[in-house]
Amino acid sequence: MAVAVYPGSFDPVTYGHIDIIERASRLFEVVIVAVFSNPDKAPLFSVAERVEMLRESCAYLPNVEVDSFAGLQIDYARRRNARVIVRGLRAFIDFDYELQMAQMNKKLEPHVETVFITTSSNYAYVSSRIVKEIALFGGCVEGLVPDSVGRRLVDVLRRAKRDAGQSP
Ligand code: ADP
C-alpha cells in the first residue's frame, strides 16, 4: 500500500498546500499530512491549532490523515511505513533547498522516495509567510486560505496585539 507523508510547517495551511494535498490524494492510497514541530521557528499557531485547521480543510478527502511530529522527517516517514515523501515546488528558489533535503533523506533512508508536485500556477505566489504578512497589515486573505483559517488569523493576530499591550 503506497503511503505518502507530506511534511511541512503549515503555519497556517493555505490553498497552495491544499492543492498539493488534493493532487497527492489522487496519486497515493493514503496521504499523511504531518505538521512539523520545529523548535527553531517561532510559529504563529500552535501545533494543535495547525493540525485542527488542516483537519477541517481536508475533511472532504477521505484518504488524507493529519498528524504532527518532531525530529527528522525521514524518521517519521519510517515510523509510519511511508514509501514516499511529498513536497510542493513553487519556484526556482524552492529547488535548491528541496533538492538538498531529498538527497540527504535518500542517503539516510534509501527506501523512501521524495516526490515533487509542482504548484498550480494560480497558487505559485501563495506562502504561509506572505499570508501572515497580509493579515498582519489588515489585508484580505480571501482566496489564499480557507475562510475558517482566515478567521483564525484575524483572531490570533488580535490576541497577539492585545498581549503586546496594544489596543485590539
Ligand atoms: P511555507 O511556509 O513556505 O508555506 P511549509 O513548510 O508549510 O512552507 O510547506 C510545506 C510544503 O508545501 C513545502 O514543500 C512547500 O514547498 C510546499 N508549498 C507551500 N506553499 C505552496 C504552494 N503555494 N504551492 C505548492 N507548494 C507549496
Image (cartoon, rainbow, N blue to C red):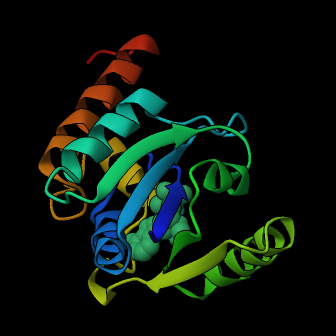
Where residue 15 appears, x then y in whole percent?
27, 65
Where residue 61 appears, x then y in whole percent?
19, 60
Which quadrant of the figure contains the C terminus?
A: top left
The residue at 41%/51% (across/down) is 133
Which one is in front, 61 or 149? 61
The residue at 53%/72% (across/down) is 87
The reply to whether residue 165 is in sight is: no
Left or right of residue 101: residue 41: left
Where residue 50 appears, x then y in whole percent?
39, 38
Left or right of residue 18: residue 41: right
Asked if 151 appears above or below 131 in the picture, the reply is above
Where residue 82 appears, x then y in whole percent?
56, 62
Which one is in front, 90 or 29? 29
Asked if 114 appears above or below 10 in the picture, the reply is below
Asked if 112 appears above or below 64 in the picture, the reply is below
The residue at 36%/42% (across/down) is 136
Which one is in front, 126 or 110? 110
